[in-house]
Image (cartoon, helix red, strand yellow):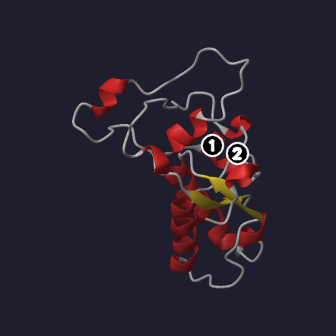
Amino acid sequence: MTMEYKSFTYNMVPPLFAVCFIEGCPQAPTCLRHFAGTFIPSVIHTGSAVYPTALNTGKCAEFKPLRIMRGAWGFDTIFAEVKQKDSTRLRNDIKQFLGGHGTYYRYYNGSRLLTPEQQEWIISLFRNYGYTDNLTFDHYEDVYDFS
């Protein structure tokens, strides 16, 4: 992993992300839910949690791998060389993929993180339209994968 565990803070955890405190879970050392649970500040007393019933089959049904991903933000760079004739069609394809007009603009403006899978899909779309240069997003950062 490229990110040090010590750089983690509980502020990184999304509000509805369930954390885990199950003692003895065999997957705990590699689980993001268990990892996040070890960082809960003493002022937090309630929230979403994984229940022990998640281990009923012997393997946690709520396991979330502890993974660092290369997140991306913003579309200005990738759209910089796009011909006007392709711009509307590219935007519409991306809007459909990302879930609509408002969601698209949150990604476009860099206020929402693009996962590696989303980045790959968008870059593939641009290649299908014949674009091969500057297929990068505005900003990249290694982040914990809560997606």
List x then y, in percent, for residue 51: 39, 24
Q: Residue at x 71, y 67 (%)?
A: 137
Q: Which mark is residue 117?
A: none
Residue occupying image coordinates x 35% and y 25%: 52
User: Where does the N terminus fall, quadrant-wise?
Assistant: bottom right
Residue receiving disc 1: 103
**CA–CA distance in space, label 1 to label 2:** 5 Å
Q: Amino acid at mark 1?
A: Thr
Q: Which residue is mark 2?
A: 106
Q: Does 2 sit left or right of 20 as displayed?
A: right
**Residue 136 in picture, x, y percent from top left:** 70, 73
Q: Quadrant of residue 90?
A: bottom right
Decide if residue 145 is on the left or right side of residue 85: left
**Element type at marker 1?**
helix
* Label 1 with label 2: CB-CB less than 8 Å: yes
* Percent of width and height locating residue 144: 62, 51
Height in image: 54 above or below 107? above
Name the amino acid, label 2. Arg
